[in-house]
Image (tube, rainbow, N blue to C red):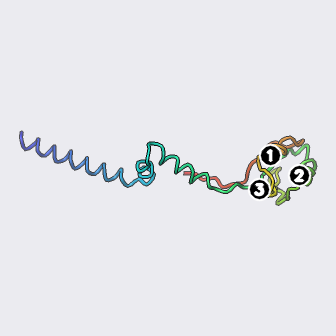
Amino acid sequence: MKKYFQVSMLLMSLLFIQSTTASAQCPIKEQIMNGDDGGEGLARIKRESEKTPVSHTLIIFFDKKTGNKPLLKAIKKQGCTLLYKYKEFSAVAAKVDEKHDVDRAIAEFRKVKGVTSVNKDGIMQTQ
């Protein structure tokens, strides 16, 4: 009985050692755990992710029945550059001037007759 107890304690200690070494290899967990206070690691990760540049290119979808004429006029009026007219679907790509606010331009384009949606251009990542 004493041997069974010793063997089970040895196995439990090996499992404990293995689990602690596996958890220490996670880089995000290390960043969170090494922070000065409880939330500093998370705040640092959030700050690093917010450093991505703002895209000034917009993808603007419009209704086929209305057409793209009101949209093209609005693009010209706001001083934006027409980058591409999509043939596969009813949309255009427009670049907002670097001096102008992208969110304000999105709000203005949503008011244009026939516009169904306005999206910032970007890359989507799937995991």
At which x and y percent is residue 123?
66, 55
Q: Foreground: 39 or 95?
A: 39
At which x and y percent is residue 28?
45, 51
Q: Residue furthest front?
A: 36
Q: Which amino acid does the dot numbered 3 rest on?
A: Thr
At which x and y percent is residue 70?
92, 47
At which x and y percent is residue 92?
82, 54
* 66 sits left or right of 99 in the view: right
**Upstream in the sequence, badge 2 or badge 1?**
2
Circles 1 and 3: CB atoms closer than 8 Å:
no
What residue is disc 2 on?
78
Total marks drawn?
3
Find residue 63 and report its image quarter. Answer: top right
- Residue 93 visible from this viewpoint: no
Circles 2 and 3: CB atoms closer than 8 Å:
no
Q: Which amino acid does the dot numbered 1 rest on?
A: Arg
Separation of marks 2 and 1 at Cα, in angstroms: 11 Å
The secondary structure type at the circle numbered 3 is strand
What residue is disc 3 on?
57
Other-residue count near label 3 (Cα within 10 Å), few / some / many at <14 / 14–19 / ≥20? many
The secondary structure type at the circle numbered 1 is helix
Q: Which amino acid does the dot numbered 2 rest on?
A: Gln
